[in-house]
Image: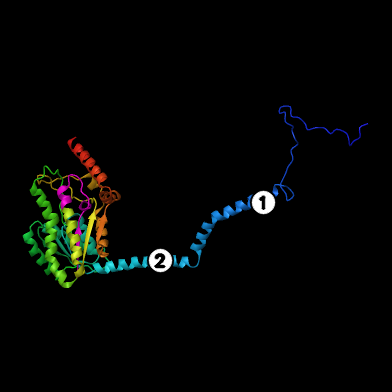
C-alpha cells in the first residue's frame, strides 16, 4: 500500500503540440505581500513625478494668466491701445476739417478720388489741373453730393500746367488768394512712361521729369514761404513703389519717382525746425488710366491698359488710405501688395537676387512683345 503522503502526484500536463509543460492559468494581481510590489510602486511614483514636471509649466502659465495681477494689466494695455487709436482718429478728423488742401492732378484717377474724400472730410479744397472744364465738372459733382456729415466748403479751381515752370509762381499766388493760406499741399499730378532706354529720346526723359519732379518741386518751393511764416503746413508727395525699386522699361518714370523720394526726404529733415510735416506716399498698381495715358520712347501716347494696372487696387480705396496717412501725419507710407513690398527689402538685403529677378522679368517682357 502506498500511503497518500508518499503517493506520486501527477506531473504537469504536456501539450501535444508544444513540448513545454502547459501550466494552469491563474489570474494574478500584485499585492503588498508580493516581491514586485515595491518596484511597481516606485515606477508609479516616478511616472507621476514626470507627469507633474511636464504639466508644471502649463499650470504655472495658466496661473500667471489668470492671476489677479496679469488680467487687469492685460485689459489695461488693450484699453490704452484702443484709446490711443480713438484719439488718433479723432485728431485726424479734426486736423482735416476746415484745412485748406491743394490737390494737383485733380481731374482724374487718384487725384479725383482724393478730392472726393478730402471734401467729405470737411476740407477747403483748391483743385488744380490743366483742364479747366474737367475741374468745373468735378466741383459740380462734389457740391451736388450730400453724403457727408460735416460742413463742406465750395472748392476753388486753379488751372495751370506743371511742366510750365514759369507759370507755377503765378499759380501759387492764385492758390494763396483763394483762402489766404495753405495747410496741406498734395502733389499728385504725374505721368507714366513705357519704353526701352536705347529707344527713348532725351526729350521724353525731360518731359517725364518736368511733370513728376520739377513741377511738384517748383510748386512746393513757391508755397513753402507762406507755411514757414505761419510755422504750419503739410507737404504730401504721391510717389510710387517705383520710387524705391526700379523695374525694366520704366526708366524715366522710376527715375522721376526716385528723385521725388530723395527730394522730399531731404525736405522733411530741413522743415522739422519750422514744424512743417512732409509725407511721401508710395502706392503700387492702381486701376486708373495712368498706363493708357503714358508716353512711349518717341513721345507718343501708349494707349494700352497694362494687365498689372487693370488688376491694381481701386483708386477709391487708395484715396481713403491717403486721407488716413495725412490725418495721422505719417512720414513715409507704402500702399502696395505683399510682393512689391518684399521686393523693397530684397533690393537691400539680397541685391544680387533682386537684379537677377529684374533681368528675368526684362527677358520675359521682351519675348512677349516680340512674339
Magenta-colored span: 232-255
- The outermost residue toward the right is 1
Residue tagged 1: 41
Helix, strand or loop at disc 2?
helix
Where residue 123 appears, x then y in whole percent? Answer: 21, 66
Residue 96 placement, left or right of 50: left
* Residue 306 drawn above or below residue 316: above
Q: Does the stretch in magenta take in 258?
A: no
Image quarter (top left, top right, bottom left or bottom right) of the C terminus: top left
User: Which residue is nearer to you in this view: 250 or 117?
Assistant: 250
Residue 356 placement, left or right of 206: right
Residue tagged 2: 77
Q: Does the stretch in magenta take in 251?
A: yes
* Residue 149 drawn above or below residue 9: below
- The outermost residue toward the top is 16
Q: Which of marks 2 and 1 precedes in the sequence?
A: 1
Amino acid at each position: 500500500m502506498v500511503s497518500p503522503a508518499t503517493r506520486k502526484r501527477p506531473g504537469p500536463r504536456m501539450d501535444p503540440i508544444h513540448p513545454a509543460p502547459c501550466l494552469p492559468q491563474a489570474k494574478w494581481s500584485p499585492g503588498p505581500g508580493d516581491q514586485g510590489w515595491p518596484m511597481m510602486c516606485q515606477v508609479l511614483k516616478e511616472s507621476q513625478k514626470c507627469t507633474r514636471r511636464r504639466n508644471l509649466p502649463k499650470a504655472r502659465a495658466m496661473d500667471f494668466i489668470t492671476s489677479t495681477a496679469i488680467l487687469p494689466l492685460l485689459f489695461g494695455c488693450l484699453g490704452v491701445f484702443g484709446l490711443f487709436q480713438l484719439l488718433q482718429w479723432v485728431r485726424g478728423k479734426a486736423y482735416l476739417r476746415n484745412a485748406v488742401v491743394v490737390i494737383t492732378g485733380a481731374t482724374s484717377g487718384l487725384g479725383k478720388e482724393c478730392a472726393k474724400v478730402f471734401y467729405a472730410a470737411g476740407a477747403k479744397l483748391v483743385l488744380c489741373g490743366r483742364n479747366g472744364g474737367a475741374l468745373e465738372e468735378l466741383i459740380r459733382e462734389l457740391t451736388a453730393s450730400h453724403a457727408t456729415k460735416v460742413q463742406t466748403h465750395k472748392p476753388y479751381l486753379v488751372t495751370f500746367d506743371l511742366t510750365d515752370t514759369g507759370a507755377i509762381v503765378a499759380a501759387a499766388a492764385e492758390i494763396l488768394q483763394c483762402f489766404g493760406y495753405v495747410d496741406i499741399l498734395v502733389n499728385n499730378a504725374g505721368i507714366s512712361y513705357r519704353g526701352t532706354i536705347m529707344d527713348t529720346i532725351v526729350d521724353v526723359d525731360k518731359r517725364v521729369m518736368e511733370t513728376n519732379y520739377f513741377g511738384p518741386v517748383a510748386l512746393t518751393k513757391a508755397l513753402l514761404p507762406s507755411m514757414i511764416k505761419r510755422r504750419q503746413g503739410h507737404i504730401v508727395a504721391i510717389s510710387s513703389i517705383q520710387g524705391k525699386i526700379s523695374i525694366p522699361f520704366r526708366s524715366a518714370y522710376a527715375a522721376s519717382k526716385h528723385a521725388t523720394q530723395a527730394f522730399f526726404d531731404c525736405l522733411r529733415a530741413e522743415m522739422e525746425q519750422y514744424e512743417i510735416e512732409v509725407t511721401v506716399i508710395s502706392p503700387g498698381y492702381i486701376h486708373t488710366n495712368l498706363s493708357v495715358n503714358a508716353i512711349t520712347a518717341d513721345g507718343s501716347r501708349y494707349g494700352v491698359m497694362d494687365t498689372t494696372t487693370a488688376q491694381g487696387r481701386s483708386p477709391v480705396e487708395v484715396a481713403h488710405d491717403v486721407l488716413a496717412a495725412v490725418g495721422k501725419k505719417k512720414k513715409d507710407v507704402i500702399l502696395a501688395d505683399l510682393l512689391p513690398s518684399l521686393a523693397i527689402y530684397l533690393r537691400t538685403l539680397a541685391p544680387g537676387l533682386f537684379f537677377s529677378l529684374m533681368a528675368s522679368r526684362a527677358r520675359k517682357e521682351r519675348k512677349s512683345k516680340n512674339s
